[in-house]
Amino acid sequence: MRADPTQQAAYGRLLKKHTPAVPVVRNALMAFIVGGSICAVGQIFMNLFMRHGLSPERAGTLTAVTVVFIGAVLTALGLYDEIVRVAGMGGSLPISGFSNAVVSPAMEFRREGWVLGVGARIFGIAGPVITFGLLTSMLVGAVYVLFRLPLPK
Amino acid sequence: MAVPNTDAARALPPPLTLSVPPTERRKGRTMLLRQAWITGAASVVGPTEGRGPLSEGFDEVADDHLLGRGSWEKAESELMRRALARLCDRMGLRQGDFDLLLAGDLLNQTVATAFTARDVDVPFCGLYNACATFTEAVGLAAALCDGGYCRRVAVATSSHHDAAERQYRFPTELGNQRPPSSQWTATGAAALAVEAAAGTRAWARIAAFTPGRVVDYGIRDPFNMGAAMAPAAADTLAAHLFDLGFGPQDYGAVYTGDLALVGVPVCEDLLRVHGHALHLHDCGVELYDRGHQDVHAGGSGAACCALVCAARILPELRAGTWRRACLCGTGALHSPTTYQQGESIPAVAHAITLQAPGAG
């Protein structure tokens, strides 16, 4: 039995009355605190690397690698999903979240083997970021070429 | 709130009238059963469920989520295997003493069940109605026993939180924040014995079975399955109570499968239109301690209502504290593929009425 549009609309109103609201303020606050803390940790590493004589560019790259590594370790220990459960985008958006999105399917699908498991599915979550990231770069590149804009250094 | 909610009245589907003439075995949509008894039950759960309020009622609490097996799927099979083994132990039977195994789970191609059945040497019929599989299986087993086609049937369902996560949602270690309406797939398995003769060990009699129709209210959010299933539960429960001529006063408790915190009040509102001021218990709500266990709106999964039936409902009936109990399992019949293709979530609910052995 499929409900007709009138029934569906009435049901939608009934549902609204009983569906708990997403705790937006608490979620946003936790995202700010946790996301901010991850960035602060990154900044500490960056300052450390620069103090040891690395150029800001090199230090930035090494910081990204470090935070990715920390994200991977926390994922392997089964802790990163607990962080994101509380922090939402505060945990998903930093590069450690990207690391979690690559490492977690690798762990999950290891049981289906190295090729069809890990190999085929490692980018199952992060894949869209890569696909649309590439697409966006191509479009931006096309704009630069078409309008003969000066390339940034 | 005695006045029916107007939106609930507008939303309600018209009752389904079948052209089956009433007999002593059937009234409307409901099968009236005479000789179908639950004579034993066993349950095995994961560590999370073992820390819940029903922990005392389970036969075994596993101490790790993998049960020492190599994958979530193998762990789920192991849960059902152990539940069936414990059922046999408890009843002093061998597997071969059962005529048939009716069982199911949530995994694609119901592999957890099929791989358990590989090691259980009895005829096997696999069933799938998502989280309504348990009441579907109990109802069918009861009908087969009452009809004289089987003497003793084993019924089992299982689900595993992590196996369901990786199949329906994301890799288990991927971080994500769920909305408060989302539900937690239970890890566990329960097995029942349904017999045509009560003998000396009757726990409860299966008195009636109303199979549900598939109902779809256009809900597309897999994180709000209670909303998708509530109309199906209300439809089946209303038919079940109408056919039996029962009301809330006739039951020690009326249970829904896993409507959880969103679905229960919605279903209660819909039933009020039918004139039933029911206080619904819900297996998904009672399986966990929501104050201390972060399961959002409550539990779900094919094992959810089976576990609550084995650990909570059957003991009450067996002790005679409840004369009668109704259990309406609720299932969301979608798959990850269908919701990614934009399909809504169809739902089904099957209701059974169980009576205490002394209650006639």
Image (cartoon, coloured by chain):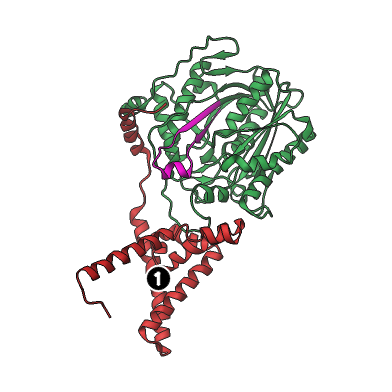
Measured as percent of width and height from the top left, residue B148 is found at: 70, 18
Measured as percent of width and height from the top left, residue B138 is found at: 62, 28
Q: Is residue B74 visible?
A: yes
Q: Is residue A125 above or below residue B326?
A: below
Please name whichever residue, B81 or B10, is drawn nearer the observer in this view of the structure.
B81
Q: Is residue B303 visible?
A: no
Q: What's the residue at 66%, 45% (across, down)?
A: B77
Residue B40 location, quadrant: top right
Q: Look at the image and give the residue range highlighted in magenta.
A: B327-351
Please name whichever residue, B254 or A80, is drawn nearer the observer in this view of the structure.
A80
Look at label 1 and name its amino acid.
Answer: Ser
Q: Is residue A28 above or below residue B55?
A: below
**Which shade of the palette goes to chain A?**
red
List the residue tagged with mark 1.
Answer: A37
Q: What's the residue at 28%, 69% (across, down)?
A: A141
Q: What's the residue at 46%, 22% (across, down)?
A: B238
Magenta stretch: residue B349 in it? yes
Horizontal side, residue B346 vs residue B1: left or right: right
Measured as percent of width and height from the top left, residue B125 is found at: 65, 31
Supply the letter of whichever chain is green.
B
- Which quarter of the figure is the C terminus of chain A placed in? bottom left
Horizontal side, residue B138 vs residue B283: left or right: right
